[in-house]
Amino acid sequence: MDDPFAILGLPRSADLGRADVDRAYFAALEAAHPDKVAGGDEAARRRAELAAARINEAYRALRTPVGRLETLCRLGGIDLDSSDPKRGAPMPDTAFLTEMIERREAIEAARRAGAGALEDLRDAVEDEADEAVAQARRALAGGDVAAAARALVRRRYLARLLDEIEEAMS
Amino acid sequence: MSTEHDPGAAPGLFQIEEPDAGAPKRRAAGLGIGIDLGTTHSLVAIAPHGAPPRVLEDEAGRALLPSVVAYVTDPPRVGAEALALQVEHPDRVLSSVKRFMGRAPSDIDEPIPYALGERPGDDGRVVRFDVGGRLVTPAEVSARILEVLVARAETALGAKPDGAVITVPAYFDEAQRKATKDAARIAGIEVYRLLAEPTAAALAYGLDRSEQGVFVVFDLGGGTFDVSVLRLDKGVFQVLATAGDTHLGGDDFDRVLAEHLLRAAKVETPSKHVRAEALAAARAVKHALTTQPVAAATLPRAGLEGFEVTREAFEAMIRPVLGRLRAPARRALADAGVEKDEIDGVVLVGGATRVPAVKRLAERLFGRPPLDDIDPDQVVAQGAAIQADILSGNPREGVTLLDVVPLSLGVETMGGLVETIVPRNAPIPIRARQVFTNYSEEQTGMTIHVVQGEREMAADCRSLARFELSGIPRLPPSMARVEVSFQVDADGLLTVTARELMTGVSQTVEVKPTYGLSDDEVERLVLDSLDHADEDFEARDRAEARVELDRVCTAVRRALAADGDDAALLPPDERRAVAAALEEAAAALGDPARPAGELRRLRERLEAESEPFARRRMERALAERMAGRRVAEVERAVGDAKALDERRGGHHPTMTPPAPATE
Ligand SMILES: Nc1ncnc2c1ncn2[C@@H]1O[C@H](COP(=O)(O)OP(=O)(O)O)[C@@H](O)[C@H]1O
Ligand SMILES: [Mg+2]
C-alpha cells in the first residue's frame, strides 16, 4: 500500500496535528476533486474519481492521532492489521491478556455496584489508553517501531474494553 | 470464509482503468438542474452560470409539486391534480412512494395502503403497486414526478436540461440510491450526482452567508429523518458524520393522529376511503396546530363533526415518535467527534420541523436555538441547483463538497458475522479492499455476500448483493487469497470486485443487486418512455392534447343528449357549468394555435365539471343492469362498465373494489 503521508504531501511525523492533516487534505482535494473536472470527458472524470479515492483513503488513515501512529508503524515494517507472525501485530504478553480478562469480568461487578463504579472504571481505562498512545509516540520518536507497535496493540485492547464499558453504561 | 488483512497484496488496485466504450460526452455548462425528489413534495431549481439559485414554479405559481401520481387517467396525473383524486380513488393515487424505493415487499414494516402485484421472476424482491390491474414500481412512479420537474426546468431554461443533481436522504442505502438513479433513467434525464439532502441544504445555507464552523443539519420531512454534522471552512463543505432513519417523518404524526380521530369516531375497521379521509384530516389538523393551540377535524365519511384536538394532546400523542429522533442525533454527534458546545449552528430542514415540539426537541438536543430563517421547503433544491451548475462544468471558486458513506459496507464471513470493509462516514469517493482466505482445502468456491448496516450479524443488515467466486485452487486452510475490493463512487454507489490472488487469475464479478429492478427492465422502461418522446415533441404534444379534448367533448355531448334533461342525474346548476366548459373547449378545438397546456387545462376542467354527472349515470346503469340478474350477467355488466371506463380514460368511480376491512 502507498504512503498516505506522501499522498497528502505531509512529512512522516508523529507530531502532526489534526489541523495540519486537514489542511493538506483539502489542498490535495482542491486539485483532484471529481467536481473540478465535471465538465470534462468521461476519462478525465474517472481519473479524478480514482485520485480522490486515493486521497480519501490516505486521509482516513491519518485523520486521528492513533491512525497516524499506526501508519508510521506500518511504514516502519509492522502492520497492526495483519496477523503475520513476522510483519503483523505483535501478541501482547500473557500478563496483559490475563489482566484484560479479569477487567472484563469487573465490568459486570461494577454494573451491579451502580453507575458511579462504571464511570470510575471507564476513566481509569481511558487514562491507560492515552498513556499507551503517549508511549507509542515516544517509542517512534526514538526509532523503536517494535515497542511502538506493542503499545498500540495494548491500546486496541483497551479501546475494545472501553466500548464494552460504555455499552454496559447505556 | 475467514478474513485476514494482507499487507502485501495487489499493488495494482489504483491503476487507472480507461472507460470501456463510448465517445467522451461533454456536459453542457449552465444546463444543470437541481431536483429535490421528496417523499411529500418535490421541487426543481436552477442556478445557471454561477447565478443565485432559483426555485421554479408551475403556471399557477406553485413551487412545491406534491409527490403524488394518479393512475386514474392515461397518461397519469402528477402533483396537486393527482392529490385531489386521492380520497375518491385511494387505490390508484400513489403518494409517499419514496418510502418504497429500493425496498422489497418484505422490508416494509408498515401497513402498505396499496394493493401489490408481482411479475414472474420478481421473487419477492420488487415492490409493484397494482393500480387497477396495471403494475408500476416506485421507480416508475418517481420517474413521472421527475418528468414534470424536468419539463418545468426546460421551460425556464429555454433548452433541454443536460443533467440533474437529485437529492436523496443522507441515510438512503445503496438499493434506495440505485432505485433513484433508475427513476431518472426512466424519465430520460442524466444524473450528474445523487447528493445528500442535508449536504445540499448546507451548501445553499453556507454559501448564502459564507459561514464558518461546525453545523448540524436537522432534516425531518414527510417520511425520512436525517441528521448530519458538517464543517464549513473557506468554501469546503465537509460532512463529518450523518445518521438518521428512513422511516420516520411527519407522516408518522399523521398516522398517530388519524388513529386517534378514528377511535373518536368509533370506527374500528376503516375502509380505504375512510382511512384516506382520516389521514388527510389529521394532516390538516397537524398543520393548523403549528400556529394555533386548538384545531378541529371533520370526517364526513366516518361521521365525525368538528372534533377538537389541542396542541397539548397532539404533542402527547406524538411523544413516542419524537423519541425516535434522539438516538440518530446523538450518534451523529458522537461519530463526528463533536461536543454539543462546539456546534456553531443548527439548520432546520423539512416541513415537519415546523411542528413546535420538533423545534423544541432540536433545541434541547443541540443546546442552541435552531436557525430556521431560510425556507425549509426550498433550501435542499437550492443546494442541488448550485451543485448541478458546478457539475455541468461551471466550477465555482472555492466550493468543494466532501461527502461520506452513510452506512458501513461489508461482507458476510464464516458464522454469519459481518466484516466491515468501508466503515460508515468514510469520505467518498473511496476504495477499500480486504483479503479473505479459505477455511478448508475442499473449498474451491466462495460466496461473497455484500451487506450494508451497522449490526454484527449479516442477517440483521441489509443484503445488497450475493455472488459466487469459483475456481479457487485447492490449497491448505488459510492459504488461498481472495481479494474483495469495494469502490464507492461520488454518488455513494458501490461496485464490488473479487479476485483470486494466488493463481493470478483475476475474476471480476458483476454484482447483481439483490433488490430493485434488473438492468433489462430499466432499459425496457427507458425505451417505453422514449416511445413517447419525439423530436417534434411540441407538435405531437399539441396533437395529443387535441385528440384527448375532442374525445372528452364527444363523450360529454353524447351523455348530455341522452340524460342531460334528467335533473336527478344532472342538476341545473351543474348543467350550466358543464355547458360552459363544453363551449370553451369547443372554441379551443376550433383554433389550431392553442398550446397543449391550455387544451389540457380545458379538458381537465370539463372532466371535473362533468364527473359527478358521469358517475351518477354509471351508477344508475349498473343498478339497472344488476337488478334481478344472475351472477354471470352481473359480471358481464361489470366487464362492460370497465370497457366503457377505459374509453373514458380509466375513470373509475364505482368500480373501485370494496375496501377490504384490514388493518
Ligand atoms: N406548517 C406545518 N406544520 C406541521 N407540519 C408541516 C407543516 N408544513 C409541512 N409539514 C409536514 O412536513 C412534511 C413534509 O415535509 P417535506 O420537507 O416537504 O418532506 P419531504 O422532503 O419528505 O417531501 C409533511 O409531513 C407535512 O405534513
Ligand atoms: Mg425533503
Image (cartoon, rainbow, N blue to C red):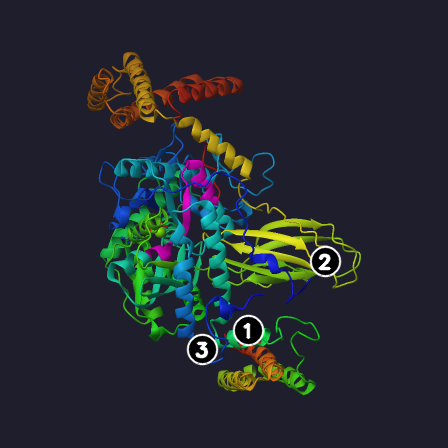
Q: Nearer the viewer, residue B452 or A146?
A: A146
Residue A32 is inside the magenta segment: no
Q: Mark 2 and mark 1, same subunit?
A: no
Residue ID for mark 1: A71
In the image, which disc is placed on residue B502? 2
Question: Sequence order check: which comes first, mark 1 or mark 3?
Answer: 3
Residue at (60, 54) in percent of width and height: B450
Q: Quadrant of residue B585?
A: top left
Return the x and y of residue B132 as percentages of the image width and height: 46, 30
Taking B324 as reference, is A77 left or right? right
- The alpha-carbon separation of the residues under discs 1 and 3 comes to 13 Å
In this view of the protein, can residue B426 be seen by the observer? Answer: no
In the image, which disc is placed on residue A16? 3
Q: Please, what is the three-letter code of the amino acid marked with disc 2?
A: Met
Return the x and y of residue B43 as percentages of the image width and height: 31, 45
Q: Please, what is the three-letter code of the amino acid marked with disc 1?
A: Thr
Return the x and y of residue B4 as percentages of the image width and height: 66, 66
Return the x and y of residue A82 as percentages of the image width and height: 65, 70
> What residue span does the magenta drawing correspond to?
B179-201
Verify CB contact (< 8 Å) between mark 3 and mark 2: no
Taking B440 as reference, is A24 left or right? left
Q: Which of B202 and B15 is in front in this view?
A: B15
- The alpha-carbon separation of the residues under discs 2 and 1 comes to 26 Å
Kind of element beneath mark 3: loop
